[in-house]
Amino acid sequence: MEEIVNLAAIEGSVDFSMFGMFLKSDWVVKLVIILLVIFSIQSWKLIIQKILMINKQRKISKQFENHFWSGVSLDELHQQIDDFEQESFSNIFRNIMNEYEKSRLQKKSIDSSFIQRLYTSLDLSIATEDSRLNQGLSFLASSGSVAPFIGLFGTVWGIMNSFQAIAIAQNTNLAVVAPGIAEALFVTALGLFVAIPSTAFYNMITSKIDNYLSEAEVFGKDLVNIISRQVK
């Protein structure tokens, strides 16, 4: 009976909603919660941006690749290149064709070193595209690894507050302990809420980017092979 009364007293005196626990927490836990909320907002913003960007890049790349294989000459497509939106396939095509044009203008011999220069241009293009597409993803990786520890810090602090409340009240009653424990568990859950999506989507997005760049590299090698056949 006494336990039921204590539980009723706790429910009446303490607001266990997320906002209520935030308001009741001390400044350290408030700071941890605000930091985790910022991490969460930035992570979801980045996740949505990257997914939309990759889907758009794939769509534009497919259009460019279809035009490339439509029978248009390389020189004609090179002249039209600025009409296409920027994406990996068109960027690779532009860079390789620019290297090809330089060799033709400088009347360099068409030998193995010429082909090697084209492959070097391809490698540099892939590296540039990799850097461009992965820009900002380090934040997701950091969120996934750091957020649980930030949450753990808030958890430890909340438990310390519970022990302080026990020492002050000279009582281990649930009404004394519950607010601090609830606060600690809330911060733990918030840390996991930030970390789990960040880690999962980081792995998914990097996998999509790797697959996309592999397709772009195959396209670039096809282009180098076409050029090498034309100049022989």
Image (spheres, rainbow, N blue to C red):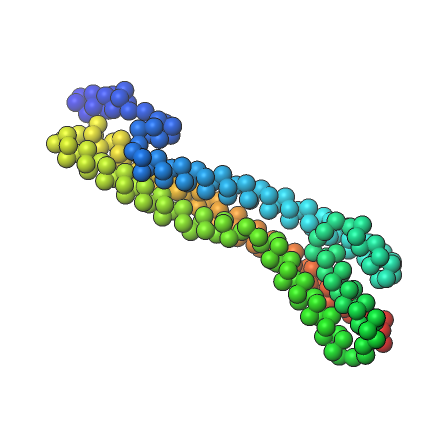
What percent of the width, then of the height, locates residue 154?
32, 41
Q: Which residue lies furthest to the front in this view?
A: 106
Q: Residue at 74% across / 62% down in the picture?
A: 95
What count of labels does the image hold? 0
Q: In this view, does 92 lie to the left or right of 181?
A: right
Determine the image quadrant of residue 10.
top left
Q: Residue furthest left?
A: 170
Compared to residue 145, the image places residue 193 above or below, namely above
Q: Residue at 60% across / 43% down in the picture?
A: 49
What percent of the width, then of the height, locates residue 21?
33, 29
What percent of the width, then of the height, locates residue 214?
65, 61
Q: Determine if residue 133 is in view.
A: yes
Q: Determine if residue 204 is in view.
A: no
Q: Residue at 57% across / 52% down in the picture?
A: 135
For the N terminus, which image quadrant? Answer: top left
For the C terminus, which image quadrant? Answer: bottom right
Determine the image quadrant of residue 123.
bottom right
Q: In this view, does 113 lie to the left or right of 10?
A: right
Compared to residue 119, the image places residue 78 above or below, namely above
What percent of the width, then of the height, locates residue 83?
80, 50
Q: Residue at 22% across / 32% down in the picture?
A: 177
Compared to residue 142, the image places residue 154 above or below, namely above
